[in-house]
Image (spheres, rainbow, N blue to C red):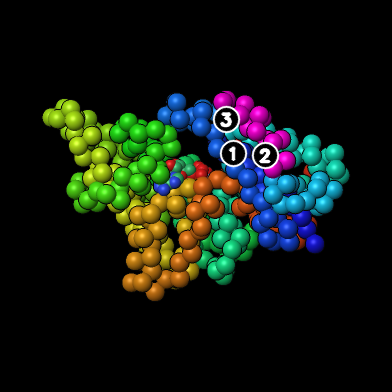
Amino acid sequence: MSVILAIESSCDETSVAVCNNGKITANVIANQTIHQNYGGVIPELASRVHQQNIIPVVQQALIDANVSKKDINAVAFTRGPGLLGALLVGVSFAKSFALALDLPLIAVNHMHAHILAHFIEDPKPTFPFLCLTVSGGHTQIVIVRDFDQMEIIGETMDDAAGEAFDKTAKILNLPYPGGPLIDKHAKNGNPLAYTFPVPQIKNFDYSFSGFKTAILYFIRDKVKENPNFIEENLDDICASVQHSIVNILLIKLKKAALEYGIKDIAIAGGVSANSGLRATLQEEAKKLGWNVFIPAFEYCTDNAAMIAIAGHYKFMKNDFVGQDVAPASRMEF
Ligand code: KG4
Ligand code: ZN
């Protein structure tokens, strides 16, 4: 019997969830709209807004789950990777809450949690499976052998896929976060209107830095010829950029699936909400005989339900941390 309170504060979402014996009974997410004015997440503002939001969001989660503080058996929290100041708010809250109620603490890796979001609802993947984890800060191909056995076999050398979406949106004068807006405009555009270079990177690794620059120069040159180029061709530009990013992601994913002989393929992280990626993955699955696992939209972008489910599996293994735990801004812990 376990009731786990889970806290996520790694970037610009303050989220709190409750997991009751492996079932998510609350998942409250407070989005920070303040960053829209700046074209990207401002770390210090994120920390301050987490500090304002954390208590009300916890209270709402307890109401939604219909539990009181005394029903909780453990507190799970995102230890990292993420923005240090933002993580500190969630980690400090979790520690204080656990200390006051004499509860064990569970430290969760945010990127592992994105993958474990697949265990919130059916159908659940079986081990081993391959997961393309694509977010605002990471792009990884991971072999998932068990809940706590994950091997990164490929990752970006520089920028993440989410950054490629967000940076393109910024060049196109769209507000942050641009990924969902590019997705929206892409629905009405021609994906083959413009072509962009595919980075030539070794093994299963990625690179999006040169790709971003190619888009910047392409738009700059086109706007020189026609100052209204963006407005007149927005849908086609978005469709073409999205098509290129999805193509880049899929080339390496297919290569990894073939090399490791794995046909159970999942996607996770904020960019897994992209309709182009979801549709292309389904098409490839039909051609290649893959079983694909695509998370529900609410579990793609940052949320505490994924921290709660990761916490649930750690709770069953008594995998706890002490009160001396601190945030980890890098992947390894
Ligand atoms: O996983 P996430 O919520 O936060 C991080 O851990 O980084 O991912 C956020 C990223 C942002 O770059 C955002 O633009 C992107 O996910 N994103 C999308 C879509 N929804 C969110 N990118 C493309 N299409 C979408 N529909
Ligand atoms: Zn994330």
Q: Nearer the viewer, residue 173 or 207?
A: 173
User: Which residue is situated farthest in the left direction here?
Assistant: 225
Q: Viewer-nearest of labels 3 and 2? A: 2
Q: Give the crowd class for mark 1: few <14, some 14-19, many >=20 residues within 10 Å.
A: some
Residue 48 shown left or right of residue 166 in the figure:
right
Count the marks: 3
To which residue does mark 3 refer?
A: 46
Residue 231 shown left or right of residue 42 in the figure:
left
Give coordinates of residue 25: x percent, y percent. Answer: 68, 55
Where disc 2 sits, the SS reads: helix
Q: Tags 2 and 1 in contact by the CB under 8 Å rule?
A: yes
Q: Is mark 2 within 8 Å of ligand 1?
A: no
Where disc 1 sits, the SS reads: strand
Residue 221 shown left or right of residue 94 in the figure:
left
Q: Give the crowd class for mark 3: few <14, some 14-19, many >=20 residues within 10 Å.
A: many
Disc 3 marks which amino acid? Ala
Q: Earlier in the sequence, mark 1 or mark 3?
A: 1
Q: Is residue 97 magenta?
A: no
Disc 2 marks which amino acid? Val
* Image position of 22 with respect to 77: above or below: below
User: In this picture, which residue range is highlighted in magenta?
Assistant: 44-60
To which residue does mark 1 refer?
A: 30
Q: Earlier in the sequence, mark 2 or mark 1?
A: 1
To which residue does mark 2 refer?
A: 57
